Image (cartoon, rainbow, N blue to C red):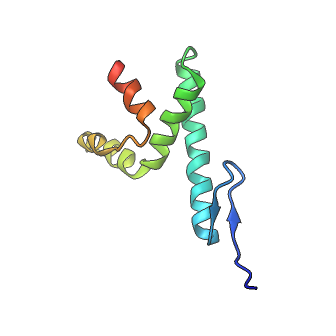
Amino acid sequence: MAVIAMWKCDRDNSMFDNKKEADAHDRMLELGEHFSHLLEQVIPQVDEQAAEEFGLILARNKELIIQACKGKPEVISEIELEDKKVTQLSASR
């Protein structure tokens, strides 16, 4: 029987077959958590789930966010909303 090394992310229990990917995923989740907390501080009445989803969208698309902050705001339109809930939330506003 072969043994396969796997890495588990503490934050969401995702499994990865190499440490580099697991660490990158963990850093992305940590960034998303910080974005969520910031949103909750700025808009205290925001729903916790919505804040978490928004934080993860920003974290998953950090390279586009960085480009937008460096003078290319049009790249924000390239952000893909992966969750239908997020798409529905943004459409209803």
Please state the horizontal and vertical placement of residue 49, each as a whole percent of the image. Answer: 57, 28
Q: Residue furthest bottom?
A: 1
Q: Which residue does the image show at 38% across and 27% down from the upper left? A: 88
Please state the horizontal and vertical placement of residue 42, each as a whole percent of the image. Answer: 53, 21
Q: Quadrant of the C terminus?
A: top left
Q: Is residue 4 above or below residue 22?
A: below
Q: In the shown orientation, is residue 39 left or right of residue 22?
A: left
Q: In the shown orientation, is residue 59 left or right of residue 33?
A: left
Q: Residue furthest front?
A: 1
Q: In the shown orientation, is residue 70 left or right of residue 34?
A: left
Q: Which residue does the image show at 34% across and 44% down from the upper left? A: 79
Q: Is residue 2 above or below residue 31?
A: below
* Total marks placed: 0
Front residue of 91/38: it is: 91
Determine which quarter of the picture holds residue 57: top left
Q: Quadrant of the N terminus?
A: bottom right
Q: Which residue does the image show at 69% across and 70% down from the upper left? A: 6
Determine which quarter of the picture holds residue 46: top right
Please state the horizontal and vertical placement of residue 31, each as a whole percent of the image. Answer: 57, 45
Q: Residue furthest top?
A: 45
Please state the horizontal and vertical placement of residue 90, each as a whole percent of the image. Answer: 36, 26
Front residue of 3/24: it is: 3
Q: Which residue does the image show at 41% across and 35% down from the upper left? A: 84
Front residue of 36/1: it is: 1
